[in-house]
Structure formats: structure tokens, C-alpha cells
Image: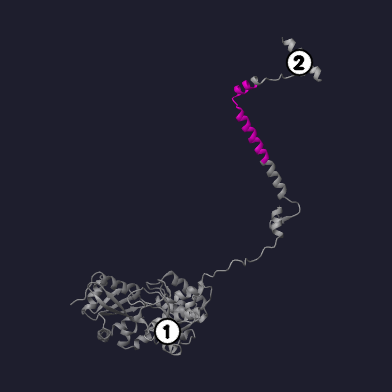
Amino acid sequence: SNVTSVSEAGSRASVEGASPHDHVVPRRSRAEMRDCRRRSGQSPYTIFFNFLLTATASIIIIVLYCLSLLLRTNQYYDDDSHGNVRIRSIIENVLRDREIPKEITTVPKVDLFVVPEALKGAVFVGHLVTDLDSVGGAIGAAALYGGTAALASEVNSETAFALEEWGMKKPPTIEEVLKENSDVKICLVDYQQTTQMNPIINRANVVGVIDHHALQSKTIVTDRPIYIDIRPWGSMSTIIAHTFLTHQRRPPMKVAGMMLCAILSDTLNLQGPTTTEWDRLIVAVLSEIAQVDDIQFLATQQFKAKSKELAGLSAHGLVNGDQKSFSFKTEKFEGDVGFAVVETTDDAVIIDRLGDLLPEIVACKKEKELSALFLAVVNIVSLKGTLLLCGPTELSLAKMAFSECTVANESSTLMDLGKRVSRKKDYIPAITRAIKSGWSKPM
């Protein structure tokens, strides 16, 4: 049978034009093919999937090749600084040849630091018994917001020194300003208590407050919303100078000098407990603008000017010079507590006048109907404080407020406050805690 099969295959090959010696693979039947696939373990679905996967991969390769041809060109070259040549794509050249506007004008520009409309043209005025920060800050705010600086009361010797040092004209008094226009807008600077406000000011005309003190008793109340900028920094002038910078404006040299002196005054040459990093930063900036090479020397000069005036002040002037009152109401106590501060480079000179000061404190306390009145003498060089106690009420409250401190003399009229030198941070918070903790006035 094998011979017959070969001869038959040879005959078929001869008929079809093939050589009888060529190897001819016999055609398989469908049954044989199914049996072969079954032995190999591949189903028709597996074979179809492999075919589809191969076709897809081939199509992707062809597409990528066509894209590479499309993006490449032999006409444009980029040569970088290192001499490397890169062929630019057609898309790059289309964008290169297209005119692109330098600025998008369809989107309106938003200025995040717009000068408040309420403060434009306002009068900026500090508190009664005005100090350097309230004057320097008012001058800075007027320059920043386009208004007028005014005085709530006569300036002290330290402020007079700063005005002369920087060649600034002393601002007019608030009485002079309101005489010309009684309905002018008012912005309070360096305070927000009505007890420190010049009585000539109409509360209805107050449009703003810029301050760095706590919101305590007798804070101003208004009938409408006003501009408020209160920050826990060492000086109000720091706030004004910072606002200059955020508005991308440079304060004039003289204005920068006034604000610099104000910050040095309120922070005790950046050594006081209320000093913040913002105060230090702004002092560095202002000293550069004002061209001050020796900040320490400037601070020493203005502190000497402050102490020089104190030597000639009467007991009445010392007690009433820098005095503020605070109202309290608890279950056991209701009344006003006054707290005066004398800052000097020579505290011994002031304390030696204890015999004159104590009767004056008692008289002032009675005149202003205060429940208690303290006078703290602060050495701004060595940073130490001494508290004058005029009676049993002051002694009782001081012992509770400053329990760690000791009475410094046999008559119990002096208390050593140690490094406590700030009314804002050291004195009033301690007095407030004592009263709210249940202190009551001794009978």
C-alpha cells in the first residue's frame, strides 16, 4: 500500500507539474485537525486571541512610526548653549510662528492690598497723654492712607526729640483740625478705649481703629461697621510700616524714621516682653530706609530725652502722665482700677520721691473715683519694675496679682516686680486674673 500511495502521489504531482521526487504533505481532514489541536491543548478561542493581539501590536507600531515621521522635519534646528542640535517638531514651529500676546487683557487684575476707602482723607489721632507710638503711628498712617495726623494732647519730651531728629513738623491738635471741619472722618490709632479718647471727638465719625492692645473694658462701640486692624505686636507703628510693605510702597525717609523711633520706644529697644519677630523685622527695614547705622545709639538718645523730662515733672505730672484705667465687674468686685507707668533710665531718682508721689496717688484716686490706683516705675535700661502702693486696697490686690513678688520696704508701699516691665503684658493681665479669681476689696 505504501508503494501505491507514493506512486499515486507521484502521478498527481506529475499531472500538476511538480517533480515526482518533491515531498508532498498530504492534506489533513477536519477530524485530524481537531485531533491535533486537542493534543496541543489550544482551543479555537486561544488561537483567535493570539492572532488579535499580534494584529493590534502591529497596528500600534505602524501608528507610532507614522507619528514620528509627522513630527520630524529637516528644516528647523535649535542649538543650545552647549552646542547640542535638536530637531524641532512641526507643532513647535507652528507655535513659534504664531503671534502670542504678551499680556492677557481679558482677565481683570485683582489688587489684594487696596487702601480702604473709609480711611482715605481721614484724621489719624492717638490717645490722651499721647506718646511716641501714637504720634509716629499717626504720621505713618496719614502718609499711607492719604489723611492727616493729629494730636490728642501735648507731646512728651521723647516725641519732641523724635520730631526734631527727623525734621518733622509737629502735627496739629485734634481741636484745631475739628475746628476747620467738625464732620471729618476719624481713625483711632494706638488705642480703642473711650476713656483714652479726646472728648471733643464724635464717636459717630469714627471710621477705623488701628491698635495693638487687648480689647478690654470700655472699648468703643459704633453704630456701623468700621475698619479694624488690631495685631498682637509690640508697637502700632509696626503695623503701619508692615502695611506700607504689603501695599508695595516705600515710606518716606522722615516717616520711616518716626516709626522706627516709635517702635524702639514701645518695645524698649526690642528688649521688652511685648517684642515680636515682626517688630525686629520692621526695625531692620526701617533703619535701612531711614539710613540709621546705629540703632542702639538712637534708642539711647531718645530714652535720655524721655528721662530728662521726668526729672523736672511734678508728682502730679508723674502720676497722671501715662495713666490708664480699666473697668471690672465680678460677683465680688465692681469698679475702675487705674495703672500709671513711669519709664526712665534712672528709677532711683523717681523712687526717692516716694514721699511726694504717694499722697498724689491717693489724691488722683479720689479725684477720678477709682477703686484702686497703681504707679509702676520701670527702668528701661536694666528692665526691672517697682510698684508703688498707696493703701491697703492696692497692697491686697498686688499680693494676689503678683504673688511671687515681695514687698520691698517696711511700710509696704513698694513692691519689687523683678523683670515685669510691661503694663500691656505683665501688669494688667495679672490684675485681671486676680480680680476674676475672686479678689474683693478689703473692708
Which mark is on residue 430? none
For the image shown, how many numbered marks are present on the structure? Answer: 2
Amino acid type of disc 1? Thr
Colour treatment of the image: one colour
Residue 344: name its quadrant. Answer: bottom left
Which mark is on residue 9? 2
The quarter of the picture where the C terminus appears is: bottom left
Q: Position of residue 427 (x, y in %)?
A: 31, 74
Q: Is residue 118 left or right of residue 65?
A: left
Q: Position of residue 415 (x, y in %)?
A: 26, 76
Which label lies toward us, 2 or 1? 2
Q: Secondary structure at mark 1?
A: helix
Q: Is residue 59 left or right of residue 162?
A: right
Label 2 Cα crowd, 10 Å radius (few <14 / some 14-19 / many 20+): some
- Cα distance in 3D space between marks 2 and 1: 127 Å
Q: Position of residue 117 (x, y in %)?
A: 49, 77
The first of marks 2 and 1 along the sequence is 2
| Residue to which mark 1 is pinned | 159
Q: Position of residue 13 (x, y in %)?
A: 79, 18
Of residue 200 and residue 378, the one placed in the foreground of this image is 200
Q: Secondary structure at mark 2?
A: helix
Q: Which residues are magenta?
A: 33-59
Whether residue 76 can be seen here: yes
Q: Is residue 79 left or right of residue 151?
A: right
Residue at (67%, 40%) from the top-left corner? 59
Dominant SS in magenta: helix
Q: Is residue 291 above or below residue 169?
A: above
The quarter of the picture where the N terminus appears is: top right
Is residue 37 magenta-colored?
yes
